[in-house]
Image (cartoon, rainbow, N blue to C red):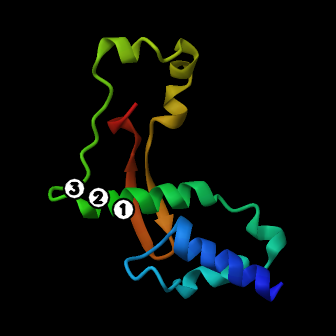
């Protein structure tokens, strides 16, 4: 179990959510691996996407620039059933990552 936790911590710090040192993992992730039966129920994907968004935002001079699909030929490729429940996925909501709160603006992209 200790080796599995160490390996997962290495994956978190080196692959999924790396920082600028590339050799350290923040200890805030350690409690997430305390109970393996609960660790699988966490939404790791959104956490990785939030970290990617944060890094992209920091990497550009004026922040990350969202560019919605504007070309007509691209917009027509999106099936109509996707737009049927747009109110469910096109929202503005806070994204919580431990002590960090950032707003996700779903209406900025398609």
Q: Which residue is painted at 24% across and 45% down in the image?
A: 65
Q: Which residue is mark 2?
A: 57
Check disc 2 and report its element: helix, strand or loop.
helix
Residue designated by label 1: 54
Q: Disc 1 versus disc 3: distance between alpha carbons?
A: 9 Å
The residue depicted at 45 percent of the width and 58 percent of the height is 50
Asked if marks 1 and 3 touch (Cβ < 8 Å), the reply is: no
**Residue 69: percent from the left, percent from the top?**
33, 26
In the image, residue 28 sits, relative to residue 108, either above or below, namely: below
Tell me the number on the disc at residue 99. none
Q: Are marks 2 and 1 in contact (CB under 8 Å)?
A: yes
Q: Marks 2 and 3: in contact by CB < 8 Å? A: yes
Mark 3 lies on a secondary structure that is loop
State how far apart marks 3 and 2 are (Cα): 5 Å
> Residue at horizontal 74%, vertical 69%?
39
Q: Earlier in the sequence, mark 3 or mark 2?
A: 2
Q: Nearer the viewer, residue 18 or 102?
A: 18
- Left or right? Give the position of 81 relative to 1: left
- Crowd class of label 3 (few under 14; some 14 to 19; many from 20; radius 10 Å): few
Quadrant of residue 46 within the rendered picture: bottom right
The residues bearing labels 2 and 1 have C-alpha atoms spaced at a distance of 5 Å
Classify mark 1: helix, strand or loop.
Answer: helix
Q: What residue is shown with label 3?
A: 63
Give the residue furthest to the left: 61
Determine if residue 1 is in view: yes
| Count of numbered circles on the image | 3
The quadrant of the rendering that contains the N terminus is: bottom right
Q: Earlier in the sequence, mark 1 or mark 3?
A: 1
Label 1 Cα neighbours within 10 Å, binned few <14 / some 14-19 / many ≥20: some
């Amino acid at each position: 179990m200790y080796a599995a936790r160490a390996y997962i911590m290495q994956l978190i710090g080196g692959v999924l959510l790396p920082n600028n040192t590339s050799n350290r993992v923040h200890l805030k992730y350690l409690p997430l691996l305390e109970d393996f039966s609960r660790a699988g129920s966490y939404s790791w994907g959104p956490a990785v996407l939030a970290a990617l968004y944060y890094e992209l935002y920091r990497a550009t001079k004026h922040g990350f620039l969202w560019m919605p699909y504007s070309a007509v030929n691209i917009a027509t490729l999106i099936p109509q059933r996707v737009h049927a429940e747009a109110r469910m996925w096109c929202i503005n909501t806070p994204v919580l990552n431990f002590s960090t709160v950032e707003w996700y603006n779903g209406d900025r992209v398609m």
